[in-house]
């Protein structure tokens, strides 16, 4: 039994303490009164102690063969702002990270790999995106937080062994109808590539988003909290 299986086979995963309203504070006073965030290293450590599912797993450490192309770690993204600064890896909550690991293994058998554009996103970055764009069609409204803020969502595509991306019909963060799953006026190979990604992710517990072919959220009945830990803090915590 592996280290992770042991952790997930016992009471750890069954712990109902994933939601820790009394131990954490408001994400931002006065703007999202009901939304609570894990904001400090101390709060994070308590949450992980309560349930190992709360751990934000470093994806590069878990899956070093994957290509990271973090779009918000530079300014050539749709906001034109470097929102992550110096992030060198990305993170997912433990159950989502393990599901991605399974999907990666299946994909490898087909001769492909993943390229990741984004996963965990600090809550303050979602607020910043809202300030910059302010349109719910393109960015999450910070009043609710997003699955990216919970470390449960991932933006990704499939690459060949030589690193070239499979043709998905549009680039990442293309907000036109062409990026929607129900847009079928595309070459057969594009539809097949999208289907490969969707099938693989859904088989491993992720849900597609109809308007973005690259976005998948891990389905879980556990009530995970929004987090506002910086990449710098996470790097220190994961040392
Ligand atoms: Zn996304």
Image (spheres, helix red, strand yellow):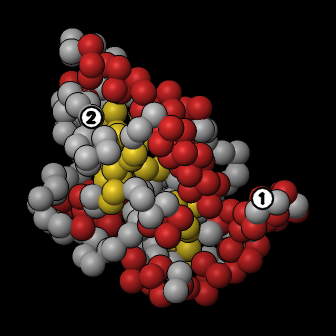
Image point (56%, 68%), residue name: 56
- Alpha carbons under labels 1 and 2: distance apart: 33 Å
Q: Secondary structure at mark 2?
A: loop
Q: Residues within 10 Å of mark 2 (few under 14, many from 20)?
A: some
Res 21 → quadrant: bottom right
Say above or below: 72 vs 136: below
Q: Which numbered tag is attached to residue 166?
A: 2
Say above or below: 88 vs 212: below
Percent coordinates x, y for residue 11 in the rendering: 88, 62
Image point (41%, 38%), residue name: 111
Viewer-side residue, 49 vs 4: 4
Task: Note whether residue 203 is visible.
Answer: yes
Image point (49%, 60%), residue name: 63
Image point (33%, 74%), residue name: 88
Say above or below: 52 vs 185: below
Res 178 → quadrant: top left
Say above or below: 12 vs 237: above
160 left or right, relative to 43: left
Residue that extends furthest to the right in the rendered view of this protein:
11
Q: Quadrant of the N terminus?
A: bottom right
Viewer-side residue, 16 vs 29: 16
Viewer-side residue, 186 vs 230: 186
Q: Secondary structure at mark 1?
A: helix
Pointer 1 or 2: first along the chain: 1
Percent coordinates x, y for residue 232 in the rendering: 39, 83
**Residues at discs 1 and 2 in contact (Cβ within 8 Å):** no
Q: Residues within 10 Å of mark 1 (few under 14, many from 20)?
A: few
- Could you tell me how many numbered marks the image carries? 2
Percent coordinates x, y for residue 216 in the rendering: 45, 41
Viewer-side residue, 67 vs 81: 67
Q: Which numbered tag is attached to residue 5?
A: 1
């Amino acid at each position: 039994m592996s280290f992770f299986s042991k952790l997930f086979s016992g009471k750890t995963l069954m712990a109902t303490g994933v939601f820790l309203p009394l131990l954490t504070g408001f994400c931002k006073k006065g703007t999202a009164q009901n939304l609570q965030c894990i904001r400090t290293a101390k709060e994070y450590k308590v949450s992980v102690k309560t349930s190992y599912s709360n751990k934000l797993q470093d994806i590069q450490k878990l899956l070093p063969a994957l290509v990271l192309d973090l779009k918000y770690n530079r300014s050539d993204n749709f906001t034109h702002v470097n929102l992550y600064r110096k992030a060198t890896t990305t993170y997912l909550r433990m159950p989502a990270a393990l599901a991605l690991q399974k999907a990666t293994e299946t994909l490898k058998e087909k001769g492909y790999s993943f390229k990741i554009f984004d996963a965990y996103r600090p809550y303050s970055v979602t607020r910043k995106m809202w300030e910059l764009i302010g349109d719910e069609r393109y960015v999450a409204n910070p009043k609710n937080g997003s699955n990216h803020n919970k470390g449960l969502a991932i933006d990704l595509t499939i690459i060949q062994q030589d690193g070239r991306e499979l043709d998905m019909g549009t680039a990442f963060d293309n907000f036109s109808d062409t990026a929607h799953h129900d847009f079928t006026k595309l070459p057969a190979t594009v539809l097949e590539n999208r289907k490969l990604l969707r099938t693989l992710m859904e088989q491993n517990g992720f849900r597609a988003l109809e308007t973005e072919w690259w976005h998948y959220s891990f389905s879980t009945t556990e009530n995970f909290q929004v987090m506002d830990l910086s990449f710098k803090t996470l790097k220190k915590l994961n040392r």
